[in-house]
Image (cartoon, rainbow, N blue to C red):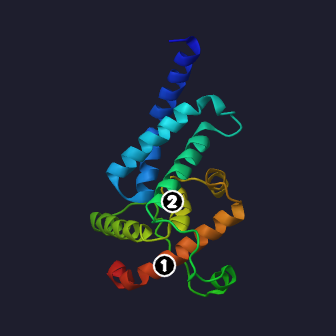
Amino acid sequence: MTESTQQKTSTFEELYEEYGDRILNTVYRMIGGEDAARDLTQDIFMKVYENLEDFNHQSNAYTWIYRIAVNHTLNYLKKKNRYSWLDLLERSVSEVIQSETPIVEFWGNDGFESPDMKLEKQEREVLVWKLIQKLPVKYRMPLVLQRYDEMGNKEIAEVMDLSISAVDSRIFRAKKKLLALMKPHLEDLRD
């Protein structure tokens, strides 16, 4: 094994060790299936290894790997006919912005919680997660990256190769659509 191959392998192992679980979690959230997520994550890291020499360090390694993961996962979803860039029935941006319906967020805080409150929060989170899975991928992905991977909109824009305003719009629409999905469950969440 040459010295450059050894260094490439060492760098790859460090990247996999540091980001492997996070990428797996993100892919799982995007597609919802554990076996497929593991297979895709393996494919993603094969692409990372194959393209390691091309990484130019203009962005951080995490953002670079996320972009590969997002693109690979989107391609997978397209092939499975579960992804569509056009949602002909969605409302226009101006219509969403002018709406008076508040956006409900279940982001919670880390204050003291009784066991009952913790259980309710867990049940609510399971429901929210199931409803997030029903969102179109173009809205689900930025919301998942923001909420579960704690990425800022600028970083999401880099990962998804979008403008920041497009990310803002997609997250806003995702929350709006999520609210609509939650409406039938709001009474259950309040009890």
Does 142 sit left or right of 58 as displayed? left
Q: Report the disc number at residue 166.
A: none
Does 107 sit left or right of 172 as displayed? left
Q: Residue at x 51, y 21 (%)?
A: 10
Rendered position, 31 above or below 44: below
Residue where numbered disc 2 is placed: 147
Rendered position, 14 above or below 139: above
| SS at mark 1 in the image | helix
For label 2, count other residues whose C-alpha is less than 10 Å away and answer few (under 14), some (14-19) or many (20+): few
- Residue 123 in sight in this render: yes
Q: Residue at x 39, y 50 (%)?
A: 37
* Residue 50 placement: quadrant: top right
Towards the viewer: 7 or 169: 7
Q: Earlier in the sequence, mark 2 or mark 1?
A: 2
Quarter of the picture containing the C terminus is: bottom left
For label 1, count other residues whose C-alpha is less than 10 Å away and answer few (under 14), some (14-19) or many (20+): many
Towards the viewer: 117 or 32: 32
- Give the x, y percent position of residue 101: 56, 86
Residue where numbered disc 1 is placed: 179
